Image: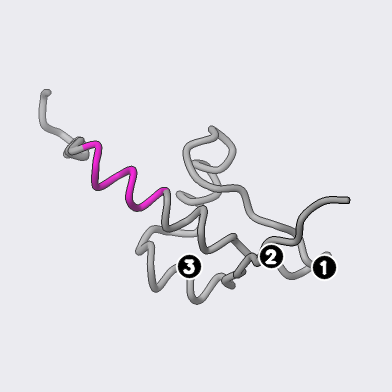
Amino acid sequence: MRPITKTTLIDRKKLHAMIPLAERTIYNMEQRGEFPRRIALTSRNVAWDLGEVEAWIDARKASGIQAARPGLAA
């Protein structure tokens, strides 16, 4: 028997309050494995695991990587 773990799910509105990126950007990042995958609750409703999103934010903070600015050579 699997131990029960508590998972908190957040909806699109709460995700976008935490991660101010466009829906398409988040979707593309999910497809590339760069962002936590959404969980299909119904055919029209999805959610994300809050713990995974927070871990992603912490990893981004810890990486110290600066986002590339469009039009500027690295």
- Tell me the crowding category of disc 2: few under 14, some 14 to 19, or many 20 or more residues within 10 angstroms, Cα based: some
Asked whether 69 or 35 is in front, the reply is: 35
Q: For the residue carrying disc 1, how many other residues have a C-alpha within 10 Å: few (<14), some (14-19), or many (20+)?
A: few
User: Could you tell me the amino acid type at mark 2?
Assistant: Val
Quadrant of the rendered image containing residue 39: bottom right
Q: Residue furthest top?
A: 74
Residue pointed to by mark 1: 42
Placement of 51 over or under 11, stated as above or below: above
What stretch of residues is rendered in magenta?
Answer: 56-63
- Mark closer to the chain start, 1 or 3: 3
Q: Which residue is depicted at the point 24% across and 42% down?
A: 62
Tag 2 near tag 1, CB within 8 Å: no
Q: Position of residue 63 (x, y in %)?
A: 24, 36
**Residue 60 lies in the magenta-colored region:** yes
Q: Secondary structure at mark 3?
A: helix
Does residue 33 show up magenta in the picture? no
Residue occupying the point 77% across, 55% down = 3
> Which type of secondary structure does the marked residue at label 1 adopt?
loop
Indicate which disc residue 46 carries. Answer: 2
Q: Is residue 23 left or right of residue 42?
A: left
The picture places residue 43, in percent across and down from the top left corner, at 83, 65
Residue in the image at 35% along x and 64% along y = 20
Secondary structure of the residue carrying numbered label 2: strand
Q: Give the distance between the C-alpha atoms of the residues marked 2 and 1, in whole angstroms.
A: 7 Å
Mark sitting earlier along the chain (3/2): 3
Q: In the depicted view, which residue is nearer to us: 49 or 46?
A: 49
For the C terminus, which image quadrant?
top left
- Residue holding disc 3: 15
Please name the residue shown 82% across and 51% down the image.
2
**As shown in the figure, which amino acid type bears the numbered disc 3?**
Leu
